[in-house]
């Protein structure tokens, strides 16, 4: 989900920087448009090749098919699709705006094309399949951006992401028949990978997706600070399988105790930093602040868990 966005982000960052003040350029509008299209397409092609070589080629491919994963991962993967497509639409919107094009719709179309390409690759993988729920989440992410631009000509509701590495137990446990050993660290490595970047992209137990807004955008007469937002977050914990905490080792079923490892959701209300509220004339700093604003940084928060517990965090990390 995220990898195409990272490569596209790197490719169009200079255009976002230029678009901050719309400076004069030696490039004509048509040349700008071609530059953005070629750069974005190259980023997509590169990321698709990377995904195929490092991910899809490791699994068996077959006929194109569909797969219903609506209730997987307590909806964390669907929120990831929404956030990723929203981010790509925003980035491409700035790039096409620099090019002088109809940025709003072109950015959304390109973002959906990038994400749909991933869904098509899923459709040929026997381990997954084309997911209409994922596709719908991609459309929702692009639509959230478009609707706000149409209503308010600004993004009053922004989607952000945060991650904090989780440590999993290496204590050895026996399978139900006592023949095999396993531990949660090994299970997490299998599901979410071992590297920090891979974990940040895959480990739903360490991720939070945020909806952030500045009250000043809604109450124009208020004196709320420009760089302080209020954010609502959603995260999950103890997910060691898509639908349930059970898996097989050598045809033997492994099931985690639901009382010791309850699959749960967290709902968080938190303060947030809006770095774009910092006044500066530097196009470069404006661009840096924009990209930093896709991340939700640690701040005070109140958390409610679906298991019935409340908790206050002086600094909520993930």
Image (cartoon, rainbow, N blue to C red):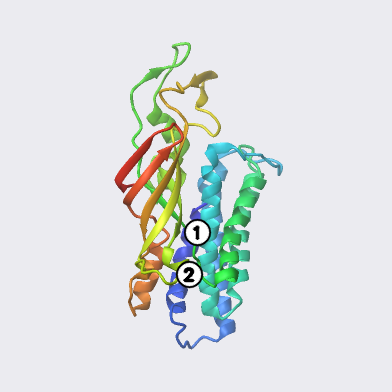
Tell me which residue sits at (51%, 72%) in the image. 94
Residue wearing tag 1: 5
Residue at point 37% right, 77% down?
283
**For the residue carrying disc 2, how many other residues have a C-alpha within 10 Å: few (<14), some (14-19), or many (20+)?**
many
Please name whichever residue, 183 or 101, is drawn nearer the observer in this view of the structure.
101
Residue 201: x %, y % from top left: 45, 47
Contact (Cβ within 8 Å) of mark 2 with mark 1: no
Q: CA distance from mark 2 to mark 1?
A: 10 Å
Query: The residue tagged with tag 1: helix, strand or loop?
Result: helix
Q: Which mark sits nearer the N-terminus, 2 or 1?
A: 1
Say above or below: 54 vs 48.
above
Q: Secondary structure at mark 2?
A: helix
Mark yes or no: residue 198 visible. Answer: no
Q: In this view of the protein, which residue sits in the foreground, 256 or 160? A: 160
Occupied quadrant, residue 276: bottom left
Q: Is residue 99 above or below residue 56?
A: below
Residue 285 is drawn in which quadrant?
A: bottom left
Identify the residue position indicated by label 2 in the image.
Answer: 12
Q: In the depicted view, which residue is nearer to us: 313 or 13?
A: 313
């Amino acid at each position: 989900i995220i990898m195409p966005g990272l490569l596209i982000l790197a490719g169009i960052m200079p255009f976002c920087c230029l678009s901050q003040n719309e400076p004069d350029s030696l490039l004509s509008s048509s040349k700008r448009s071609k530059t953005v299209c070629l750069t974005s397409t190259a980023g997509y092609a590169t990321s698709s090749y990377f995904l195929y070589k490092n991910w899809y080629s490791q699994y068996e491919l077959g006929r194109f098919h569909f797969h219903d994963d609506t209730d997987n991962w307590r909806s964390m993967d669907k929120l990831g699709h929404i956030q990723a497509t929203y981010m790509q639409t925003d980035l491409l919107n700035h790039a096409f705006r620099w090019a002088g094009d109809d940025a709003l719709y072109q950015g959304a179309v390109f973002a959906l094309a990038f994400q749909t390409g991933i869904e098509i690759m899923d459709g040929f993988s026997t381990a997954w399949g084309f997911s209409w729920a994922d596709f719908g989440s991609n459309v929702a992410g692009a639509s959230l951006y478009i609707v706000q631009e149409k209503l308010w000509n600004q993004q009053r509701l922004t989607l952000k992401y945060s991650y904090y590495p989780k440590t999993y137990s290496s204590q050895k446990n026996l399978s139900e028949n006592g023949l095999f050993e396993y531990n949660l660290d090994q299970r997490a490595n299998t599901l979410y990978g071992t590297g920090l970047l891979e974990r940040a992209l895959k480990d739903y137990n360490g991720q939070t997706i945020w909806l952030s807004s500045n009250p000043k955008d809604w109450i124009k007469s208020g004196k709320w600070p420009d760089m302080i937002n209020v954010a609502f977050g959603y995260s999950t914990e103890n997910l060691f399988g898509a639908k349930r905490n059970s898996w097989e080792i050598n045809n033997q079923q492994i099931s985690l105790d639901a009382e010791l490892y309850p699959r749960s959701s967290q709902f968080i209300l938190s303060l947030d930093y809006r770095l774009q509220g910092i006044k500066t004339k530097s196009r470069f700093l404006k661009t840096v602040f924009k990209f930093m604003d896709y991340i939700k940084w640690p701040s005070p928060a109140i958390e409610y868990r679906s298991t019935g517990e409340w908790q206050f965090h002086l600094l909520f990390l993930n």
